[in-house]
Amino acid sequence: MTHEQHIPESILLKIQKVLALSKRTSSEAEANTAMERAHLLLAKHNLSMAQVEGYDASPIERIEYDRSAPATKHYTPWQADIYDAVSRLYFCKWYHTTEWCPVKKARLGRHVVIGRKSNIEIVHYVAQYLLRTCDQLATSGSLAAAKRLAADGIELNRRAWAGSFRLGFSRRISARVREEIAKAMSGEMRDDVGTALAIAPLYNQEKTAVSALMEKDNIKLSSGSNGVVRSGGAYSLGKQAGDEANLQSNGITAGAPKAAISNAGGA
């Protein structure tokens, strides 16, 4: 392996195969298992790198900044929730920033992910799919709710409905990631033969390495807005969809969220 080598193709193909499970399975339990399986594969890859290097200061893959993913110009809470959560799950750190674009002569938003290239690739793959899933469900859900209410002569604020749905979705994703990391840290993650994986030292190692780079570059982060929930019903539906969304796919593991959204009538 060289200093610049990123995730081996064989491992990446295995992870992508697992992530594709939710697109074709009718079993919610099976699709949810895909999340844990992909986490396991990437964790084992990271552990292998760490063991080869003996947890020393010269890792095969250096910690780096990735600014390749465009973001909204202004900090958007639901997008922040998703990118931050997925980054933490895969041993990285995320923040939002704006950078000057000389071509467009304007400041543009960027999702900045800090970590090793292997992990950054998966962060973008997962987070971008979740962003699209959330946005699509929020848009279609608000339209369905508006039509239902219009039949009763009630006008729905679709923008507020969709915004609340997105917050519910993203906050549930964030909570699920905290649960998954807690399991890994407590030694509940096991390989195919049942051997417990020592993930806690890996998480701590990557957190320390990322923090060291940010400190060296004098990167200091501030907290952003949490967003405002204007529709309790939409927020609840968003949480339901976030609970059933596979963290590694562009879809929903079962039809329940879409059915619930299509039948939503309240604001």
Image: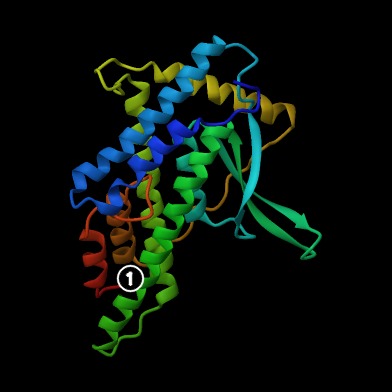
Task: Give the x, y percent position of residue 74.
Answer: 62, 59
The residue lying at 37 percent from left, 62 percent from top is 165
The residue lying at 57 percent from left, 49 percent from top is 224
Mark 1, residues whose alpha carbon is within 10 Å: few (<14), some, or many (≥20)? many
Q: Quadrant of the C terminus?
A: bottom left
Task: Give the x, y percent position of residue 45.
Answer: 45, 24
The residue lying at 39 percent from left, 63 percent from top is 164
Quarter occupied by residue 217:
top right
Q: Is residue 255 left or right of residue 14?
A: left
Task: Give the x, y percent position of residue 222.
Answer: 62, 43
Task: Say what secondary structure mark 1 lies in.
Answer: helix
Q: How is the image coloured?
A: rainbow
Quarter occupied by residue 58:
top right
User: In this rendering, does residue 230 appear at all?
Assistant: no
Q: Is residue 23 left or right of residue 204?
A: left
Does residue 190 sit above or below 19 in this rendering?
above
Name the residue beneath numbered marker 1.
141
Task: Give the x, y percent position of residue 107.
Answer: 74, 59
The residue lying at 36 percent from left, 44 percent from top is 19
As shown in the figure, which amino acid type bears the numbered disc 1? Answer: Gly
Q: In this view of the protein, which residue sits in the foreground, 31 or 243?
A: 31
